[in-house]
Amino acid sequence: MRRLILRSSFSVGDIVMMTAAVRDLHCCYPGEFVTDVRTPFPELWENNPYLTPLAEDGAGVEMVECTYPLIDKSDWVPYHCLHGYIAFLNKRLGLQIEATAFKGDIHLSEQEKAWYSQVHENTGADIPFWIVAAGGKYDITIKWWATERYQKVIDHFRGRIQFVQVGDEGSHHPKLEGVIDLRGKTNLRELVRLVYHSQGVLCGVTSLMHLAAAVETRDDARRACVVVAGGREPAHWEAYPDHQYIHTNGALPCCRTSGCWRDRTVALNDGDERDNPEHRCVDVKDRLPRCMSMITPAEVIRRIKTYFVGGALEYLTDDERASAERGIRATEDNPYDMQPLTLPAAGLACDAFARTIPPCPLHLEGRGIVICAGGERYFTNAWVCINMLRRLGCDLPIQLWHLGGEELDNTMRALVRPLGVSCVNAHKVRKNRPARMLGGWQMKPYAILSSPYKEVLFLDADNMPCVNPEFLFESPQFAMTGAIFWPDHEQLDTSGIVWKSCGMAKPAEAEFESGQMVLDKGRCWRALRLALWFNEHSDFYYRHLHGDKETFHIAFCKLGQPYSLVPHPMKPLTGTMCQHDFGGRRIFQHRNTDKWELSLNNRRVDGFMYEEECRGYILRLRELWREA
């Protein structure tokens, strides 16, 4: 009796095919083999009757590294992917295994079958449902169908078929409306059990399609499955006889005689070789491979209806419909959409968001200054900045933004009110203008966009003006572009990753220092909105950028929005960055690493203008706080 450990490192769908090969090996050679497996997905092998635990160093144990060579011939030989491992084992072991069933071999215990499904847990009833996977992995985006097309299918059957959306974390699965949302809430074994309870499946060419065939049904009938396939693979290699497999093989020059087997619709700029031209789609329409774009929602709807018109399935009853609505409401709050972007996802997500940004939707007028400050430390710096602005003759209205009452209390509000300052609690604004993430750096673009002014001078709280900055709004550069930025003194080694993910080369100019910005929101709205989006996804972008640094630069370049960059380099003083106007005159002193302290435990800085005046304002603040 031969003792085999079969090993494979392939993906879930391939391992489902491997379960079939193990079954067929034992069915064709009963009692002749003892087998064990080593794969990345042990959940697929639970309760498998054909496995016996074997030690890799056990006596007489053969290690077999399983591959799938038949796939290279799949365009022109009449085989299904179920034959892939079988053909390999036959050649490797000198056997004549034959396929014994047109499906993989997944086993559930009687206890698992008796458990309530996750749908039952959320609806309180045992209702029929279809699983939908409306996305996929980022490494092979050519398999995706458009989210809005899936939504049209869902909407068409609303109240008649209840769809349950699933999706792995780290993959592309945008939220659908009207579904029971289980994205990110099923591990692989839970997905197997969900498939067991399901009436049908809607997906692309993915592992879920193979599970739909491999997992037994509750009534011993075949499970309905509609697959949006396109032309990437030959249909005979992937399709199951009881599935509605919607393909376009033979309809386009690129898949007229075979599947194209390409991987991506567009480059993701993540450094993967799949970005190379030979791996990308050659015929893209409406941001989809044309072979997928040709498949309409109406066609998918027709294929789903086939199961109901033919009498194999029935639509929801009134009671089941009411239970389904409970499930939709129970799963509305899903943190799946809060998961961080990944490098392959970032470029696509950026492009998708950029396409949705409208021109400035608000009626704006006037000019003003926006400062973000909260807590004793930043309020102290903002106090000096505001007093210097008024000392230098600037009478523009000022908004002081903060995060909640714990950062800026009524005493602080009262202190700045005589200086023409209004305090804005971003947490309250956020109730009407949601933001995915809103912290210190993220609040810069948020406050700029949410302020009532059309033209904004943004200043970091620790930035001290040396002159009245109002003249910047009248400068030729501002008139020409509506945006003035200043250069930073250092280059980030990692920022090129973000530039590349956005489909751009890093420009041969200074990076932006965002301690001061002059902006016409009417003209720059879309670029500012994209900058906010970058900051809202700080859990990805801040890994490659220093806070909000470069988010404005990248956003303006991405959308082709003109800007004016001051040509004079930043001049460093101790703990301070000095910035200039277009004529080279110093106008800002940004104490970025030596912020003012209420205790005045600050070193004196040679060359720092108005230092005594600034210290005097801090002493005055201490007195006012003691009196309050």
Image: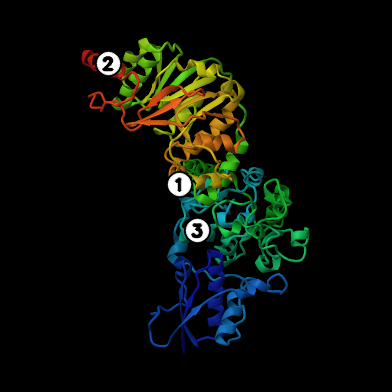
Residue 616's label in the rendered image is 2
Is residue 256 toward the left or the right of residue 266 in the image?
right
- List x then y, in percent, for residue 499: 54, 44
Q: Earlier in the sequence, mark 3 or mark 2?
A: 3
Residue placed under numbered mark 1 in the picture: 493
Residue 282 vs residue 237, the one in the foreground? 282
- List x then y, in percent, for residue 245: 69, 60
Q: Earlier in the sequence, mark 3 or mark 1?
A: 3
Q: CA distance from mark 3 to mark 2?
A: 66 Å
Occupied quadrant, residue 391: top left
Is residue 373 in sight in this rendering? Answer: yes
Residue 398 vs residue 261, the one in the foreground? 398
Amino acid identity at mark 1: Asp
- List x then y, in percent, for residue 337: 49, 44
In the picture shown, does residue 442 fall above or below 125?
A: above
Amino acid identity at mark 3: Leu
